[in-house]
Amino acid sequence: MKDVFQLKDIEKIAPKEKGITAMSVKEVLQSLVDDSMVDTDRIGTSNYFWAFPSKALHAKKRKLEELQNQFSEYNQKKKSLQETTEKSKIGREDTAERAALTKEVTTLQKKKEQLKAEIDKYKECDPDIIEEVRQANKVSKEAANRWTDNIFAVKSWAKRKFGFEESKIDKTFGIPEDFDYVD
């Protein structure tokens, strides 16, 4: 039927002719509008709904054309990939020479891994790593001596401020007798 309806008309017709409950007509109609199966427009204060058969036919034709275009594109890609595959096979035929070269490549890769593992074993002798360790040791030594300065300063302050003996301070705070700067 090629006609335009208002919501109240559809709410009367749908339960009788299509068996849709009157309570769900608005939801079903909105779902159809969302799926572009029914068109709607507001004119004045009223909303009008319609769905002409030609719209569905045109939508299906557009979808068919779109799918046919995609199909032809994919066929072109498939053909192109097959041609590329055939071109790449040229010169890669299984021959005795190719098998020997492949075996040699595998052997050389294994040897490379073995040599890499051996290099990793001797990494601690690497001059760059040794220099990094020396620099880290220097920084650590400076930090230890800085803390030693701080401890001596606190001990001196505690002796002046509270009159404690140095041996009592050392014993209370667990400072060893031979505590001194790191050389």
Image (spheres, rainbow, N blue to C red):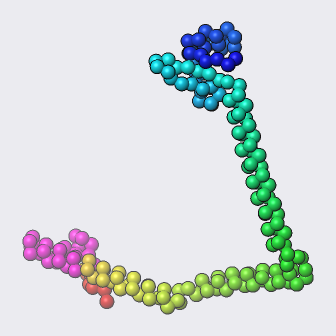
- Picture layout, residue 147 above or below residue 82: below
Which of the pair 178/64 is nearer the observer? 64
Residue 1: x and y in percent read 70, 17
Residue 156: x and y in percent read 14, 77
The residue located at (75%, 54%) in the rendering is 73
Residue 95: x and y in percent read 90, 80
Q: In which quarter of the image is residue 131?
A: bottom left
- Picture layout, residue 172 above or below residue 40: below
Q: Quadrant of residue 177?
A: bottom left
157 is within the stretch colored magenta:
yes
Which of the pair 66/178 is nearer the observer? 66
- Picture layout, residue 167 above or below residue 44: below
Specify whether 80 is left or right of 29: right
The residue located at (77%, 46%) in the rendering is 68
The answer to whether one can see residue 182 in this image is yes
Specify whether 62 is left or right of 162: right
86 is within the stretch colored magenta:
no
Name the magenta segment's main secondary structure: helix
The residue located at (75%, 84%) in the rendering is 108
The answer to whether one can see residue 178 in this image is no
Residue 53: x and y in percent read 71, 25
Q: Quadrant of residue 96?
A: bottom right
The residue located at (72%, 85%) in the rendering is 111
Specify whether 157 is left or right of 94: left
**Residue interval drawn in magenta:** 149-176
